[in-house]
Image (tube, helix red, strand yellow):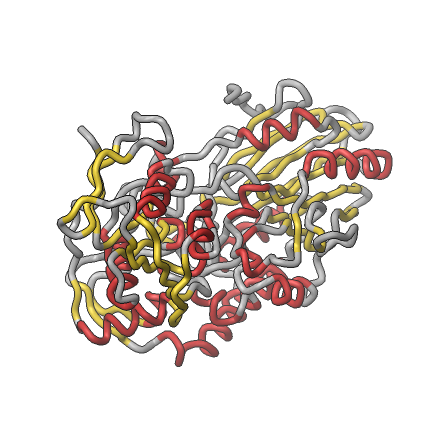
Amino acid sequence: MLTATRLAGLQTSHGSREVTILFTNDFHSAFDPIPAYWLPGSPKLGGAAHLSTLVNQIRQREQTVFLFDAGDMFTGQLSFLTKGEALMEMMAAMRYDAMGIGNHEFDYGADNFEKQMYRVSFPVLGANIFYKGTKHRFSRPWTILEKNGVRVGVIGIIGDDARSVALPSGITQLEFPDPIPIVAEAVKELRPQVDLIVVLAHQGKTGPMQTDAENRPEVQRDFDADIKLCGEVPGIDVFIGGHPHRGIEPMYVHPKTGTIIGQTYGYGTRLGYLKLSLKDKKVVSRQGELLKVWSDQLPPDPLVAAKLAQYKKLVAPQIGEIVGKARRRLVRDYNSESSLGSFVADVIRIKGKADVGLTNAGGLRADLPEGDISKGNVLDALPFVNSLATFEMTGAQLREVLEQGFTLERGMIQVSGLTAVYDLKRPRGRRMVETKIGDQPLNDKKLYRVATNSFLGQGGDLYQTFLKARPLGNGPLISESVMEYLREQREVDWPKMGRLIPQK
């Protein structure tokens, strides 16, 4: 990846106009502040109402301010229970100026998101999302915004990797062509009409689903897809990325085109801040950083807080019930075996009456706490409309599934009913060293009953092998299965670990 160039604050040129771009990405329903346990004293970061206060402080201080989002507002218990309505209402209350569409906006199907995006007054953009076999777009491709005489052209796009992690059954009527020529065409049309062009992009490699990602450089994704697009399409002034959850610090300036590329770590813990000086439709100075949203130091915006309180009260009867207890916190790890992943895989295997249970690391969105576990806690951890799906698979097909997990392309596959030794130094497709189903070696020709979630069963997260297996049936939602299991067990502890063993 190319070396980043630090954005320096330069003297404003005579006769130039100042514009401030604020941005978020991958908010994922992080309505409440998050304890930053990786920082001294575990201060709280983020929270929608606190983020809104920071935005409003900047609006009061600076004259021409735009607020954008690069997609993946959805997921989480409140999103699940309102089908995204609470997220869109929050964005309206925060007065976003435009939003690019992310893959999780389709969690409840394209028809649902179409309804949600038309409930807000700001434009929701997806230039390369079309109804299959037509030239008819699903949403607006771009928009022109004007404040204080400054005209900004904004384009929204979604990349192929993001498309591949959208719920397949939610986007059956849509297609997502290569965004590069579409952006080039839009820039050509907009450039004569505006002072500044901004792209809101949801593309690149799927980000690690960990709130401490900024403290875990080993799980950080690159933003090479953004660099590639900005190198091939001149004329983009600002490129705001999403999907990898890659906080770009300092922001990156493309050495060929001069495009400024920014992205936050997601979850609303940072607010992207970019102050530009424009003269003759060119950026003549720039200053940018990712501002930490220090929740303990920012009073909540009363308008946003009241709106969220209204939705929380509405869903309270659905999330307050205590369904069980945990002796220890069940935690996630995107690139390794985890206690939460093993626990959920166990539930899937047991409820599916299967030999093997499998789930994807990216489907685990929050830890389960020590002590009482509520329905809301389970929905935070498992917020998707994914049902229990069982298949008959050959040992060879199961081997393919495990090998896909060992690529770490979408995080480590989480397993139950098997133990596997793997070696990440080996070439992809040949990283499995040894696997046992129960206490017997994996037999390529033997048939096994495998239970997973319907997202993987539909070929999601690149697990296309499930499409070749024989389906045996679907059951309740994974979240409902976990709640039922917790009620039955009353109290759980960490499951037996040591299922996925890295080769020494």
Is 264 located above or below residue 255 in the figure? below
Residue at (64%, 57%) from the top-left corner?
95
**Is residue 461 or residue 282 the one in the foreground?**
461
- Which corner quadrant of the image does residue 336 belong to? top left
In the rendered image, the quadrant that contains the C terminus is top left
Residue at (25%, 48%) from the top-left corner?
338
- Which corner quadrant of the image does residue 452 belong to? bottom left
- Measured as percent of width and height from the top left, residue 186 is found at 78, 39
* Residue furthest to the bottom: 317
**Is residue 258 or residue 49 the one in the foreground?**
258
Does residue 297 appear anywhere in the picture? no
Does residue 90 appear anywhere in the picture? yes
- Measured as percent of width and height from the top left, residue 65 is found at 67, 45
Residue at (63%, 35%) from the top-left corner?
239
Is 215 located above or below residue 320 in the figure? above
- Measured as percent of width and height from the top left, residue 415 is found at 27, 51
**Is residue 301 or residue 354 the one in the foreground?**
354
- Measured as percent of width and height from the top left, residue 192 is found at 86, 34
Residue at (42%, 38%) from the top-left corner?
409
Left or right of 483 on screen, residue 316: right
* Residue furthest to the right: 192
Q: How many marks?
A: 0
